Amino acid sequence: MNEVGIKILVVDDIEDNLLLLEEILDHDDYNVVKANSGQQALDILGEDADFALILMDVLMPDMDGFATVSTIKANPAWADISVVFITALTPNDLSISQGYEYGAVDFIIKPIDVELLEAKVETFCAFYRQKKLLENEIQQRQDLMRQLQLSSSIFENSGEGIMVLDAQGLIQVVNPAFLQHAGYAQPEMINQHIVELHATEQHRFFYEEMWVRVTEMGFWEGEVKSYKKNGQEYPEWLKVSSVLDAQGVVSHYIATYSDINAHANAKQKLYYLAHYDALTELPNRVLFQETLKHAAANVRRNGGRFALFFMDLDRFKVINDTLGHSAGDLLLQEVAGRLFGCIRESDMLSRQGGDEFTSLLLGLKKAEDAGVVAEKMIKALAEPVLIQGQELTVTTSVGISIFPDDTDDIETLLKYADTSMYHAKDQGRNRYAFYSQDVHATSSKRLNLESKLRKALENEEFELHYQPKYAVGSGVVTGMEALVRWNQPELGRVAPLDFIPLAEETGLIVPIGEWILDEACRQNKTWQEAGFPCMRMAVNLSSRQFKDGNMLKMVDKILHKHHLEPDFLELELTESMIMQDAESTIKILQALHGNGIQLAIDDFGTGYSSLSYLKRFPISKLKLDRSFIIGLPDDKDDSKIVTAMITLAHGLDMTVIAEGVETREQLAWLEDAGCDEIQGYFFNAPMSSQDFTVLLQKMSV
Ligand code: C2E
Ligand code: MG
Ligand code: MG
């Protein structure tokens, strides 16, 4: 039924008849549509067949009323429409019975009795309305049935426990998932109140509150404790929501129970990933920052103090690069475990990334107590770690700042701990340092030194000293090592160990190193040209220089510039420099060696060397570090180590030089042990080029 009324189709070939019918049926409830032929009537039905009634003239040209009706009745979409013939024929005419056979339901005889027509039309329309209502109702019921079927299948098959409560909260029906989970049978639960189901003595108040919220707000959700029939307690996530009837009044409540573990697990997992370090399982930088903020807020509110530790492992990178990342990872895990063992439960240890750790010691009574913990941590690492069959020892340097004693600003606190850590490293590593004016002074001293170092080359403040090397047995000078000196106008002479690391960090070592090589080669050539015996000049390379892509070219350029045979140049490298990224090192070493330059490993024994690489590197000399020489000849360990290193070097066809030889006893012992060359104060300290010239002159006479 549409808003313009029930549709009635009137069909007549005479326009006046159509107008007359339209006139009679002019009523708000009706919508009269006219057709002036059987064909037009069919066309109209073809567009929209929602007519309550067709009033049709029998006698029409082309297609008469009977033919039209039989077509209509043959079409299932139209067959339901009632057709009433309007005819001038007399009732006992044969065509009336014929008309019924064709499917007409009634006849109206012309001339039209208006009242009768109105009455009949209204009857058909009423019938039509009734039919429509019924159809609608059937449709609605079908929809409802489908919906109910769907809901009931959800209810029956859901993995979540569901119950339907009445408006008072009494359980009406429970789904199988709930029954199975809780171990109840349906009848035991019916008409129990949901609060009674959960409430134990100590939790009654909680559930009563919950029910008040449900009735006031129509909704509640949260964690609840449920009890199985056998008394076992288990946590669940409960949601209760109201169902309103057509009048908007609560008719029921639906309660769903879901597995809190699944809920909580997913939440926990996300939280974990965002806040913890996967390798060590320690809190990560994010959680650390959050905790730091809370700790600061807490101290600001309640007083007290806490300590912030900044730690990194000394020389971890070397281990990582030489033994590989998986060994590095194992080491970090072990270190994390040991450090964690040094703090209390209320403190925090976190990994910032790489080999950097931080710690918060909360509720600290005295700042000095932090020193005790730092000491404990350093001790905890002292014990060697066995990784992939190798014993490794790592040490850590700890920087400590105290909140709010040093500062009450978090960012500054972090900076202070960081600076203090560098201070600890500068002081010789494997120690801790509190932030203090000392640290502050050191860091500004460092800045000051850096600005002076930047001007040193330009101001020609560098100078090379030379220390001779002697052949064991013959006592002949075999060569010399160039050692840089910095004569700083204000500071006086600055020792290499005080500025080389800074030059490395700032990159200044590249131009400084180039000057050193240039000066050493120039001096060597000068001595050769002066007629002294040709000797090999050893020059120290730093790791930054070694990694510099231009190094090979630079060396080549300098040798050419001074017309120095490559054989008279020796480069001293350290173990850590060449064991890092050993595969690419091999190529560089081979290029140098291929050009005729000699290569030596300096400070041998203090780093990590892989024997298999050592064998493949074109190295001709090992320089035993001074730390092994000091204890000779009395120290049993040192003498064993030195003997082994000499055997090793000779086994690899390398010569051995001992550096830092200061006594006759050391010299005698080394001679016995088969050491090839000696360098040290016993013969000479490093000296200026003038002094070295004097030495050469003395030698030649
Ligand atoms: P290094 O290459 O192992 O040099 C040996 C160091 O031991 C030198 O210290 C030398 O003066 C010192 N020494 C020599 N004989 C004895 C001895 O009998 N007893 C004692 N106690 N010490 C002795 P120096 O000149 O202070 O250099 C220290 C380090 O600084 C060098 O160790 C090297 O690593 C670095 N260095 C020095 N000059 C240069 C340079 O021109 N370039 C680079 N890259 N590094 C340099
Ligand atoms: Mg050296
Ligand atoms: Mg050395």
Image (tube, rainbow, N blue to C red):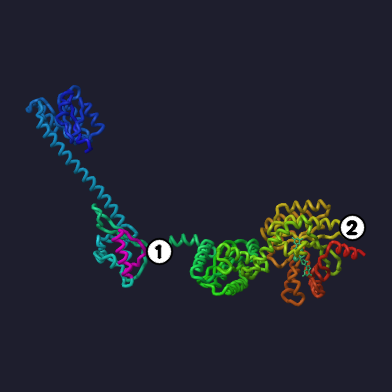
Disc 1 secondary structure class: helix
The answer to which quarter of the image holds residue 352 is: bottom right
Q: Please tell me which residue lies in front, 302 or 332.
A: 302
Residue at far top of view: 61
Q: Name which residue type carries label 1.
A: Asn
Which numbered marker is on residue 261? 1
Observer able to see residue 73: no
Q: Please tell me which residue lies in front, 195 or 38.
A: 195
Q: Give the total of numbered labels.
A: 2
- Label 1 to label 2, Cα distance in Å? 88 Å
User: Residue 189 in the image: x percent, y percent?
Assistant: 26, 65
Q: Is residue 180 left or right of residue 461?
A: left
Which residue is denoted by mark 2 in the rendering?
530
The answer to which quarter of the image holds residue 665 is: bottom right
Disc 2 secondary structure class: loop
Marks 1 and 2, the one that precedes in the sequence: 1
User: Residue 642 in the image: x percent, y percent?
Assistant: 74, 71
4 up-or-down from 204: above or below = above
Q: Name which residue type carries label 2.
A: Ala
Specify the segment rendered in magenta.
203-228
Which numbered marker is on residue 178? none
Q: Mark 1, mark 2: which one is toward the viewer?
A: 2
User: In which quadrant of this rendering is ligand 2 seen?
Assistant: bottom right
Q: Which residue is pictured at 26% across the width and 61% down the height?
A: 165
Query: Which quarter of the rendering shows the N terminus?
Result: top left
Mark 1–mark 2 CB contact (< 8 Å): no
190 up-or-down from 151: above or below = below
The answer to which quarter of the image holds residue 644 is: bottom right
Observer able to see residue 239: yes
